[in-house]
Amino acid sequence: MKKILAIDDSEINLQLLKQVVKIYYHDFLFLKATSGEEGIEIAKNEKPEVILLDILMPGLDGYQVCNILKHDKTTRHIPILMVSALGQNSSERTKGLDAGADAFISKPFNQVELRAQINVVLRVKEVEDLLRKRNEELELFIKGQTNKFLESEERFLQISEHAMEFYWEVNSNDYFTYVSPVIEKTLGVTPSEIVLEKNLLELFQLNDAKSKNSDKIQFINHTSFKNLEVELKINTKKIWLSISGFTIFGKNRDYNGKRGVCYDITKRKQAEIALGKNVKQIKNYQKKLKKLNIELTSVEERERRRIAENLHDSLGQTLSLAFLKLSSIIDENFSMNAKKTIAETSGLLDKAISESRSLTYDLSPPILYELGLVPAIKWKLEQIEKKHQINTVLIGEGQRIDIQKEFNIFIYRIVSELVTNVIKHANAKLIEIEIRKEKEMYYIIVRDDGVGFEMKINNKRKANEGFGLMSITERLDSIKGKFKIQSKIGKGTEAKIIIPVGKN
């Protein structure tokens, strides 16, 4: 049975959340914990679908609980929705998201909004679970195919150790004068059917129109050859032989014939063909996984945009109407206390309107869909400069990036992630973004004058470090792009996004 876990030290809040779950999620079992320690234990044992987490609690607070759950391999895939009165403070929301929370909702919350947030994280978890399942299936498939190949290789080695080769000799006319008896086991013909009856080209079927001219030339020319592979069709079977031979010359350097040996390499060739098919199948699976990754990102962005539109059209409009109605009666003949309350309520509504507008733009900036990628990047830099007091520069503001519209969000999220990393870790005073086109490539370069870091050899971080450099590389690879980064301690960092022009 599916479960929802609520962690809150307030019994009243837990009862309220229980009622919400009872009303909207009939098939979910409601679990509760009154402390962070208890919540962690229940989460590990019960594996709920969603965790509703308060921040202010005795003992472990919400940030610590979130951090512990997201670093435990048994619980890190469970989405966490922080429900707290601190949600009105943007710095607290940022702190919660940095701790690993997947979403944030403020107390007192609207039941409809809470339901929408829970639905979003449930949908995202469903898609992520599907992707993990596909990855596990692919890993099992690759492991199985690898074991099969190793078994085939081992069998081939055993056969090779006990292989029986046949020897032969031809005269100056290239007709066989001797063939060892083992040929009967290999090709199904007796030596008497070969000697003085067939020549080299006939036996090895090199007089066939489909045979390679280069192979034929080596037999016709009086030269030695080694490990020449030929494919023979014997009745309905295909047999591969590896042929080695040398030329026999007389005293006057006249051509007297050839001697050689043939090895049956059918098992090896069959294994190579099977391996080639398996590799092709694995590559097809990899392509499907990349496509699934793109679809997952697209679903996530559509949900972000839908929620942003709902916040703007529903919650934002409602708050604005409430603000206008309160503002219209502030001059009425009320007591001083009533007027003060009305003024304070109007101020809170105005703040809520501003917060909802900011949340809407963070979820899905309308400017990206209306004006395009470059204006959206410019808007992002303006917001960063205003909010974090960091100088920003955009070079190439007039550059137009011609890629498929659905991939604009990929690039915007990557740029946002790089800029966020600068704000968090670089201690920079300047962020510079350059956009340019060279030949058939677009270059989007994010530079900072921060502390820098020591470069790893492969420029990749561990996969469990969030979006990370490895995730950026994988996402760009899915749209045929590249990612390069250079940094030195004390010299800042330069991250370069390279995408082909109009070929995605």
Image: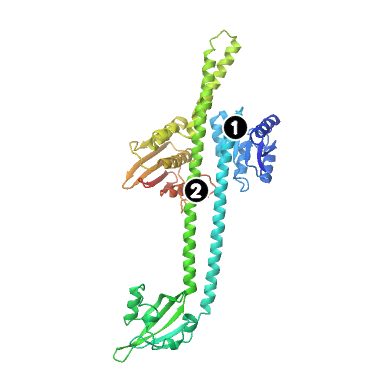
Which residue is the site of mark 2? 292
Residue 92: mark: none
| Percent position of residue 165, x then y | 47, 82
In which image quadrant can residue 429 be found?
top left
Q: Amino acid at mark 1?
A: Leu
In this picture, is 258 found above or below 437?
Answer: below
- Residue nearest the viewer, comparing 336 with 267: 267
Could you tell whether 405 is left or right of 47 in the image?
left
| Percent position of residue 66, x then y | 61, 40
Label 1 neighbourhood size at 10 Å, few (<14), some (14-19), many (20+)?
A: some
Assign a secondary structure to mark 2. Answer: helix
- Residue nearest the viewer, comparing 218 with 340: 218
Q: Quadrant of the N terminus?
A: top right
Assign a secondary structure to mark 1. Answer: helix
In this picture, is 344 found above or below 34?
Answer: above
Q: Amino acid at mark 2?
A: Leu
Could you tell whether 438 is left or right of 240 in the image?
left
Which residue is the site of mark 1? 114
